[in-house]
Structure formats: C-alpha cells, structure tokens
C-alpha cells in the first residue's frame, strides 16, 4: 500500500518533467518565431521547472531504500542532485540577464504574433492540469512536497503575468503611440532571470537541509505519537525520536507493553506499530521499534502523572 502511493507521487514528478519540458519547447518555438524575449525567458523558466521536477523525482526514488548503516546517504545524494540543478539555474539566469540587457540596449522592437499569446494560453492550461494531477498524487506523501508544488504554482502565475505584460506592451506600443513601451519585453526577461536566480538559491538552501539529518521537534512528531498510542497493545510510549533525512523520516520508538505478554505477542505489537506508521505516513521510510515489558516503576509513574501525550490509560 505504501509503495503504491509513493509510486503515485513518483508518477506526479515524472509528469512534471514531461509537461514542463513540453511547455518549454512550445514557448521556445513560439518565442523564436515571434521575437518575444519575455516569452523566450519564460521558456527557460519552464525548462528549469523540468529540472526541479527531476530533483523531486530523484528525492522520492532515493527515499524508498534507506540504508541503516548510512541512513542519510539518500539525503546526501538528493542534496547533490539539487546542487547540480541549482548550478544550471544560475548559469541560465545569468545568461538570460546578459541577453535581456543586450536586447534592451539594442533598441530592437517587435510585435508578437497571435500564436505567441496562444502558446502562453496553452501553457497555462497544461501547467494548471499538471498542478492538479500532482496534488492528487502527492497529498498523502508529504506536506513539504505539497508546499513545493504550491510555491511553484505561485511562481508560474507571477511569471505568466510578467510575460503577458511584456508581450502586450510590445503589441500596443505602436498602436498607442508610446514606442518606449517596447522596453517592457526585455525588462520582463530581466525579472524572470532574477526569479530563476532566486529559485536556485532556494534549491541550495534545500540541498543543505537535505544533506544533514534533522531531528523533528516535539510538536512535529506529535502525529506519530498519537498514531502509536492508538495501536492495540501499546500501554506506554517511553521514547519517540523522528529524524528527517531529505524527503523522508526515520522513526525510533520505545514502547511499554503488558508484562504478561509472551515474546511473540510483544513482537506482534511492535510489528503493528511499524505497520501503522509506515502505512499512514508515506514519508516515513523506516521505523525502529523497541518493545519493553511494563515495569513496576513505569506503572508507579503512570499512577502519579496526569494523562499525557506519551501514554494511554
């Protein structure tokens, strides 16, 4: 069940690679034939989205098989992939910035053809369809993945507005008798280049975060705690530690069970704990459960404490 849902998230990432690449090609050809630099910059932006989807896909792929001897190895590999994508973003952004300034100084004026606007409209439809597709397949995997898709969608909306403004300015410059409006087209390219550079910086930050394991705070680990509490046979949660490794989490939990249970019955309780966590939270890649018989001190402590999030009466 967990593998199947995670595969759905991988399909969403693959669809992102294919769709963003196709949108990039569509905008690129329309930009070449229409002469709109803003649309060409948008094509490069969509191409970097394809690279970003590739980084997400690699992260999901690597999170499937964590190594107990080197639990953060997938996180480090994912970080390396994101750093490579970030470098590509920086190179493209700098090149776009240089070309945009050159076009602005050249004084070249263009009037985008109707198919440039048609390509922009088709790309909007495709990108919105991609967003809805990926959200449906990733909402059960990781809230961070959803935040990533939402952030990408907001950037796409902003970039589309900027491109539309630049192309419209070129179109109406002559009709309105305001020839200076043509400069908005290369200026839109400059803004998009800056946004791409910012996206590269975000990838670097995420790469640094993925390279190092990070222990979740108590409130972040609370959903895991509540899930373990509801497992039949668990009387006390002695300790729960959740460590984040890139896109996935490894949970270590120590539980107290009825001391009258046999070793086999205690093992079954531990197995149920692992199964519940990995089926409910698909970004949980592994669970290490330690089962201890409830001792006298534990029962005495439970009789003195108020009911808390760490144990069940």
Image: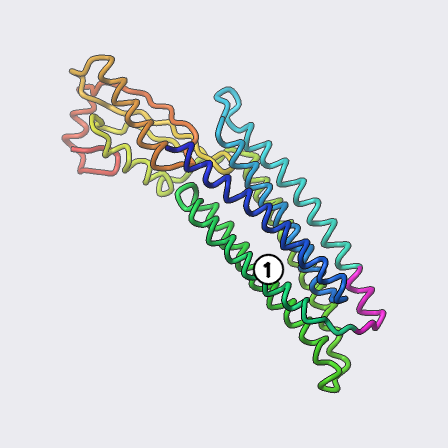
Q: Identify the image quadrant of residue 230.
A: top left
In the rendered structure, the answer to whether residue 14 lies left or right of residue 21 reads left
| Magenta span main SS | helix
Residue 201, relative to residue 109: is it above or below? Answer: above
| Within-10-Å neighbours for mark 1: few <14, some 14–19, many 20+ | many
| Residue 151 on image: x %, y % | 52, 55
Q: Residue at x 26, y 34 (%)?
A: 310
Viewer-closest of 298 and 283: 283
Vertical placement of residue 29 versus 289, above or below: below
Q: Nearer the viewer, residue 18 or 229?
A: 18
Give left or right: position of 190 versus 262: right
Residue 61 drawn above or below residue 151: above
Which quarter of the picture shows residue 185? bottom right
Assess whether residue 105 is covered by the magenta stretch: yes
Q: Residue at x 25, y 38 (%)?
A: 309
Provide the residue designation for mark 1: 123
Give the residues in magenta: 99-109
Indicate whether 294 appears above or below 201: above
Verify whether residue 308 appears in magenta: no
């Amino acid at each position: 069940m967990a593998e199947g849902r995670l595969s759905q998230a991988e399909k969403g990432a693959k669809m992102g690679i294919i769709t963003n690449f196709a949108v990039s090609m569509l905008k690129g050809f329309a930009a070449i034939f229409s002469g709109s630099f803003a649309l060409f910059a948008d094509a490069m932006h969509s191409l970097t989205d394809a690279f970003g989807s590739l980084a997400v896909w690699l992260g999901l792929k690597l999170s499937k098989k964590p190594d107990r001897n080197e639990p953060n190895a997938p996180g480090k590999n994912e970080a390396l992939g994101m750093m490579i994508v970030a470098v590509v973003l920086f190179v493209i952004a700098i090149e776009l910035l240089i070309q945009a300034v050159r076009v602005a100084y050249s004084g070249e004026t263009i009037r985008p053809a109707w198919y440039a606007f048609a390509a922009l409209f088709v790309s909007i439809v495709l990108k919105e369809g991609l967003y809805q597709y990926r959200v449906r397949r990733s909402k059960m995997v990781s809230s961070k993945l959803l935040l990533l898709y939402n952030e990408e969608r907001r950037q796409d909306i902003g970039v589309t507005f900027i491109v539309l403004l630049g192309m419209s300015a070129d179109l109406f410059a002559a009709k309105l008798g305001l020839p200076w409006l043509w400069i908005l087209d290369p200026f839109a390219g400059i803004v998009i280049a800056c946004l791409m550079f910012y996206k590269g910086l975000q990838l670097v930050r995420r790469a640094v975060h993925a390279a190092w394991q990070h222990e979740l705070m108590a409130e972040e680990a609370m959903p895991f705690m509540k899930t373990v509490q509801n497992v039949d046979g668990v009387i006390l949660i002695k300790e729960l530690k959740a460590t984040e490794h890139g896109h996935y989490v490894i949970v270590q939990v120590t539980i107290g069970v009825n001391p009258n249970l046999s070793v086999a019955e205690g093992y079954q309780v531990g197995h149920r704990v692992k199964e519940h966590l990995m089926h409910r939270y698909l970004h949980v890649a592994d669970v290490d459960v330690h089962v201890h018989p409830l001792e006298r001190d534990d029962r005495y402590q439970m009789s003195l404490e108020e009911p808390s999030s760490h144990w069940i009466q």
